[in-house]
Amino acid sequence: MVPGAPGAALTLCLWLAACGGCLAGGPGAAAARRLDESLSAVSVQRARCSSRCLSLQITRMSAFFQHFQNNGSLVWCQNHKQCSKCLEPCKDTWDLQKEQCHSLCEPLFPKKNYECLTSCEFLKYILAVKQGDCPAPEKASGFAAACVESCEADNECSGVKKCCSNGCGHTCQVPKTLYKGVPLKPRKELRFTELQSGQLEIKWSSKFNISIEPVIYVVQRRWNYGIHPSEDDATHWQTVAQTTDERVQLTDIRPSRWYQFRVAGVNVHGTRGFTAPSKHFRSSKDPSAPPAPANLQLANSTVNSDGTVTVAIVWDLPEEPDIPVHHYKVFWSWTVSTKSLVPTKKKRRKTTDGSQNSVILDRLQPESGYTVELQAIAYWGQTRLKGAKASLHFTPARSASHKEQVGKPRKSVVHIQPSFQRRRPARLLEIGAPFYHDNQLQVKVYWKKTEDVSVDRYHVQWLPEVCAHNRSAGAETSSAITQVRDGHTARFSARCHFPRCVETAD
């Protein structure tokens, strides 16, 4: 750009303002960004809220102060009548963005809710106002001294800057006394111990407390799957504990995960931010196989033009397995009636990706009972881990296409048709060994009761076949009606001559 050009002065001014901000930060810019991350975490503000409640109790009962700086102080506060009212708004369940303090405190404490209201208002204040004090208006310089209204609230300013007055406007400025009364960071590296109970104990140590207010330690972690640790593939930082002791025990440590932890010391005045991420930790235990798929059910089915049926099977993906599911094995089987005494059982299988929670089975035969089994498979290095199988029983309908309601767990799906002739129980027949009684050849037929409570009897049909010289002699079909008995199995004794029995529900 040519010096003296119309936009040169403005461009130079903006460049100097931007550069000035970088130079002003200098070596502390990285620290400011880390502090901004800690201040933006709502858990830190809620820890300030908890510290205030403990401070009020310490002020009232200073003789017992020495007993409060341990993890039991938070437990004591929760069980104390007044302190528990103060501590209630500090919990994560409170959403001050949607509701007012009165609407939250009055239903819980109808008579005396002063402690709840004051704590709620304090939490609202620190959620909106960053820690530290604004500098004197005459101390503003550079762009911070411009007579403009560039902000209205602290959350509009980046980093640790606050929205402060400069005498003729409001700009984002670095606060003074940013760490006044704020506790120091833990000074030593975090130490990990795996306990025999399966818990992970994390310890740290801190320098002396520079203020009388109790210090709440906020513990956060992140983790990644895999054989090797990786910060690029790690999850976001999550708060796992708040304690007044310099240790914590965690029960939900999973094998095969690489964990990192960090700790921040917080009191009513604020925090200096979190420690640097710890070294990676992984449990010495071997990972478990994936759990059995939950809520396995029939989602929908459609009758094709050739008379076959296509169904969709769905299930719930596991929330937090030790190792991600690599793929699912799907098995489905059904029985085909033949002229021989023993029916033929057919079985098929296929695989689907571990990130999917559905599979399509096509060309199924209507009115045939199917059993579907689903198994999750994961890999830990070269080791294959097989989960337990989940099963589902259903009978595809011959009727027009329909859709089952998704989301309701069910053990099996039975389609009910209004006509008597085509209705059959969803369970396969079992034939007992033939025997002679009263000079007659008899056999017992077993089947499971249908899940339809309206069925109170079964219609049993059998067809005798006489085998001679490799051909069957024709015979009339016989039938009988049986009442449903109590229990899970209904029985009927049919007099047959090498029978081929067929039954339907009445």
Image (cartoon, rainbow, N blue to C red):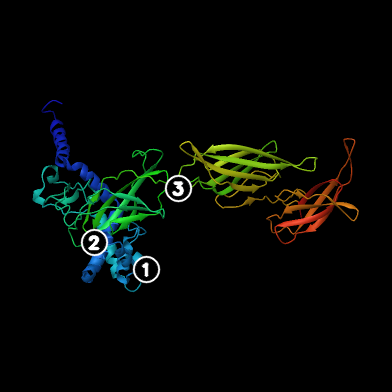
Q: For mark 3, give the secondary structure.
A: loop
Q: Are marks 2 and 3 in contact (CB under 8 Å)?
A: no
Camera-nearest residue between 267 and 506: 267
Say which amino acid is labelled 3. Glu
**Pointer 1 residue:** 108
**Pointer 3 residue:** 320
Say which amino acid is labelled 2. Pro
Location of the N terminus by quadrant is top left
Task: Identify whether 57 is placed above or below 309.
Answer: below
Camera-nearest residue between 187 and 14: 187
The answer to which of marks 2 and 1 sits earlier in the sequence is 1
Left of 271 or right of it: where is 406? right
For marks 1 and 3, give the CA distance: 34 Å
Camera-nearest residue between 473 and 387: 387
Q: Nearer the viewer, mark 1 or mark 3?
A: 3
The answer to which of marks 2 and 3 sits earlier in the sequence is 2
Residue at 35%, 70% in the rendered image: 109
**Pointer 2 residue:** 214
Left of 254 or right of it: where is 343? right
**Where's residue 247, x and y in %?**
30, 56
**Where's residue 302, x and y in %?**
64, 41
- The label number, if any, that marks residue 118 in the structure image: none
**Where's residue 220, x and y in %?**
32, 50
Q: For mark 1, give the secondary structure.
A: helix
**Where's residue 163, x and y in %?**
19, 50
Kindly give the residue lying farthest to the top in the view shown. Answer: 2
Count the marks. Answer: 3
Q: Tag 3: Cα neighbours inside 10 Å, few (<14), some, or many (≥20)?
A: few
Say which amino acid is labelled 1. Leu
